[in-house]
């Protein structure tokens, strides 16, 4: 599933192409996504100018003067800007046709993605209002994590993947960040020290920033807003490297399952 760097890569790819553009028409070929595409979208969005393209967690927000379109890519969703005359493919479910001659096309083979609409502030939408801080926000700090983790016995990796604690630290990047911070992912969140959480915050920000700069991670389906794959998989230090030598110490990378997710770690570097 695309994580924060992949979604941010898509945002950066489409934003210059659609910001300031007026929507001429909305074509919905398939309403049955993860949640039904709202019928009012086809009536309300035409004529509106896309003022900004923002990201909140894994959601992309297309803001207009009267409301906000909220995209989620799900597992296989893709957003690309194409000439409006491009014939749709089998899984091209929605087009936002722009007056300038291009369209923003949403493709999703598994239909686990979504397109919703809200006329209130999107921060108050039921899907967004309980989310934790962004990793780059000042509110995300070692002290914050240490306080939230107090007396919690779940694994620290599971803890930092909780979107109510912090958004965007998905499985790949949790593995990589914990390795960079030298923290065993199996440790109880409440036993991690303040100093270790401070290291972890620095690692999370650095890993996510590096992944964004490389266009995200492509393991199967992901492509960016221009149709290009991500390249961060070439920089992975532990994820998907079971029994390969640790890039820091040479010890064999080990694997276990935490919260039903594959977890990779170095038994020597991570304590």
Image: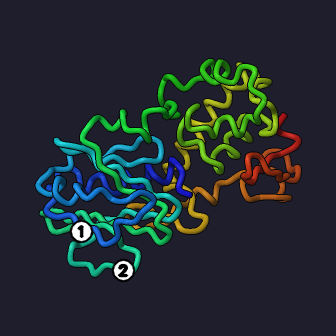
Q: Is residue 21 visible?
A: no
The residue positioned 55% from the left and 46% from the top of the image is 210
Residue 142 as seen in the image, left or right of residue 270: left
Give the number of the disc on residue 105.
none
Pick whichever, 65 or 6, lies toward us.
65
The residue positioned 63% from the left and 46% from the top of the image is 173
Pick whichever, 270 or 23, lies toward us.
23
The residue positioned 65% from the left and 49% from the top of the image is 171
What is the x, y in percent for residue 224?
Answer: 43, 61
Q: How many marks?
A: 2
Pick whichever, 114 or 267, lies toward us.
114
Give the number of the disc on residue 27.
1
Q: Are marks 1 and 2 in contact (CB under 8 Å)?
A: no
Check the image and report above or below for 257 versus 131: below
What is the x, y in percent for residue 147?
Answer: 65, 18
Residue 11 as seen in the image, left or right of residue 45: right
Residue 217, picture quadrant? bottom right
* Colour pattern of the rendering: rainbow
Residue 84 as seen in the image, left or right of residue 130: left
Check the image and report above or below for 266 versus 239: above
Disc 2 is placed on an element classified as loop
Residue beneath disc 2: 89
Cα gap from disc 1 to disc 2, whole angstroms: 13 Å
């Amino acid at each position: 599933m695309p994580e924060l760097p992949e979604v941010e890569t898509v945002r950066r790819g489409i934003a210059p192409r659609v910001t300031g553009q007026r929507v001429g028409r909305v074509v919905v070929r398939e309403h049955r996504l993860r949640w039904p595409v709202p019928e009012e979208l086809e009536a309300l969005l035409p004529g509106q100018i896309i003022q900004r393209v923002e990201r909140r967690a894994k959601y992309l927000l297309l803001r207009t003067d009267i409301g906000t379109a909220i995209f989620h890519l799900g597992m296989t969703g893709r957003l690309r800007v194409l000439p409006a005359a491009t014939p749709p493919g089998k899984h091209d479910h929605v087009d936002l046709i722009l007056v300038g001659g291009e369209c923003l096309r949403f493709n999703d083979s598994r239909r686990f993605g979504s397109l919703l609409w809200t006329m209130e502030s999107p921060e108050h939408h039921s899907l967004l209002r309980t989310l934790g801080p962004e990793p780059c926000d000042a509110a995300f700090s070692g002290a914050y994590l240490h306080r939230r983790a107090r007396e919690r016995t779940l694994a620290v990796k599971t803890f930092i993947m909780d979107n109510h604690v912090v958004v965007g630290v998905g499985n790949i990047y949790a593995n990589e960040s914990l390795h960079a911070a030298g923290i065993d992912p199996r440790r109880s969140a409440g036993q991690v020290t303040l100093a270790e959480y401070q290291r972890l915050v620095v690692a999370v920000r650095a890993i996510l920033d590096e992944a964004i700069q490389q266009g995200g991670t492509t393991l199967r389906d992901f492509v960016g807003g221009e149709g290009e794959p991500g390249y961060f998989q070439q920089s992975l230090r532990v994820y998907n490297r079971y029994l390969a030598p640790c890039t820091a110490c040479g010890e064999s990378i080990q694997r276990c399952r935490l919260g039903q997710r594959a977890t990779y770690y170095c038994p020597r570097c991570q304590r």
